[in-house]
Amino acid sequence: MSQFAINIMFVGGSFLIYILIAVWAKAGSTKDFYVAGGGVHPITNGMAIGADWMSAASFISMAGIIAASGYASSAYLMGWTGGYVLLAMLLAPYLRKFGKFTVPEFIGDRFYSKQARLVAVICLIVASLTYVIGQMAGAGVAFSRFLEVDSTMGLIIAAVVIFIYSVLGGMKGITYTQVAQYCVLILAYTIPAVFISLQLTGNPIPALGLFSTHLDSGMPILDKLNQVITDVGFSEYSADVDSHLNMVLFTLTLMIGTAGLPHVIIRFFTVPKVADARWSAGWALVFIALLYLTAPAVASMARLNLMTTVYPDGTAAEPIRYEDRPQWVKEWEVTGLIKYVDKNEDGRIQMYNDASDEPGTAFQAEAEARGWKGNELDVNRDIIVLANPEIANLPGWVIGLIAAGGLAAALSTAAGLLLAISSAISHDLIKGSINPGITDRGELLAARISMAVAIVVATYLGANPPGFAAQVVALAFGIAAASLFPALMMGIFSKRINNIGAIAGMLSGLVFTLSYIFVYKGWFFIPGTANLADTPANWVLGISPLSIGAIGALVNFAVAFVVANATDEPPVEIQELVESVRYPRGAGQAQDH
Amino acid sequence: MSGHSYDAEKYWKANLRLIFGSLIVWALVSYGFGIVLRPMLSGIPIGGTDLGFWFAQQGSILTFIALIFHYAWRMNRLDKQFGVDEE
């Protein structure tokens, strides 16, 4: 059977499962649609959160980013997992006790203000929409790469599949498809990793293999990697970063942002009890860690594999001849993800660090002496995961699994985000403001229509991504960290923060964070409007625009505290509401009001 | 559970203490061992690199999991002890 047929079989088979689940899990009420009926088991929910959280970026790109920058990208590993500690202790149990359907609804009720709810809705839509564009584009790319269809066509197929299960089943359909998608993506990720770890270190567990001995050289694998890459002018894999402050703030922004992202928070509304919300967070992190502990191992091993492919006789000897390159390099050259230019016309592949402003300039002289005229192999970072099965000589069905896994990661995250957007529109805007008297059936219909519209908008933007789509990390995490997380946390842990304080806090956190990002990335990401070049030398105290969300959160807390203390304290019934979310008894089911 | 009873306050204080302690560990393993204190731990080798590198890429994640399960277990017991658990 051809690889194409195998890929079709795996992707088609997984889609069929998702659609069957959707038909089985049809939503009958708004409660089904928004919170899957409220009876999801904590382990099931943990798995669904895992799929909801791990996006195309986690699945396809993260290992490649780590492979390229080594220790410095640990910020992603810690940041995208540490947020669950904050969720488990500071938000999830209390918001579950509150027992409503959306994040803006809590903010609106707690701060007794429609304006506060509206600010929260806007933050939610901007953060989630930015995020979903990346997922849709990722699904389109995965389709075009594995199934040989045009990426716009792939995007439309993906949108139709999401449409079927999320419009029919809402959160109920999404929950159970996410469980299936988690299983597909984790198998696809770990199987090739286990084989690569076995080949290089003899250890079947990649996370342990990372700190084991490299079989061929007898050296610890990270030592070997450091040696090979510094030999050709790259900086050490385990090298420290220039600014600890920036790395701390970037990690903190990712953690707070993770905890403040609405599509993750609403998943905690689906479990029966407050105690289950706590367990759910733990299980979610277990399921996420299975991938996040494997990723750094994949990163270093794949990079070492790549180096030994190019320098089969060691870095002191001449690199491999282009005509002798392995089969997987030939296959991925076709896609343009690997590019070779024979700059010195010797028929060999020189891969080294030719950037003169990087450390290792002593190496530049050596390279010239060896007759090298610049780096000749350009490898896209996504290759680290996508080509893994071929690098490890695994059979064709593993490649099919990677195709299905990449799509599962993109679809599951997209569906979760789209639900967060559509419930904010139908529940917070339509029922909350425009038509409070709407019946449950009417609201369910409104929710389905909002979902359908959100999918169409996301598909259009996925096919024609606006400039800001590439800024997902800065924008989505910055907004969630600087506006939503502090408001939610203060709403639970302080009785003194009032409506004016909360709104002033959210707006100042938001304006501060967005301004800092816009100064370096362009106002509203319009090209050419940046005030300063986005380089470390220009950053205030060396803080990059990606790291500013944590400072924005501080601004939010500080402004809210000062303003609230200068104005009237919240009414008694609001203080009682705060009191009630702190004690689990009587949470019952997430309910309509 | 109603209003400002003495027990309710004790329950909430116990929760805050638990959260505070957990977050100290949370910050220590990631921002501490993984980033700021890494140069101080560089003398402790682990599989071809140093302890700080291990905390940044694996140790902190494993600690986070332990922290959440510990918190869930302690809180669920505290709920019962103070009679604020759900039936």
Image (cartoon, rainbow, N blue to C red):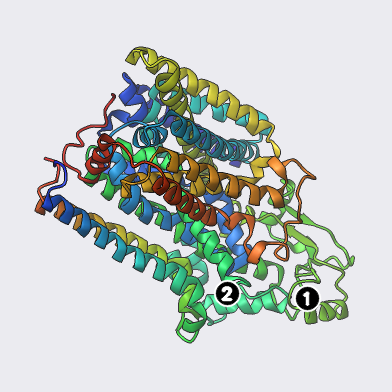
* Dot placed on the residue nearer the N-terminal end, 1 or 2: 2
x 45%, y 34%: residue: A116
- Image position of A304 with respect to B47: above or below: above
Residue A187 seen in the current view: no
* Circle 1 Cα neighbour tier, 10 Å, few/some/many (<14 / 14–19 / ≥20): some
Residue A465 horizontal/vertical position (percent): 68, 35
- Image position of A37 with respect to A79: above or below: above
Q: Specify the amino acid type for callout 1.
A: Glu
Left or right: A187 in relation to A227: left
Left or right: A522 in relation to A403: right
Residue A238 - label: 2
Q: Are marks 1 and 2 on the same chain?
A: yes
Q: Secondary structure at mark 2?
A: loop
Residue A318 - label: 1
x 56%, y 40%: residue: A131
Q: Secondary structure at mark 1?
A: loop
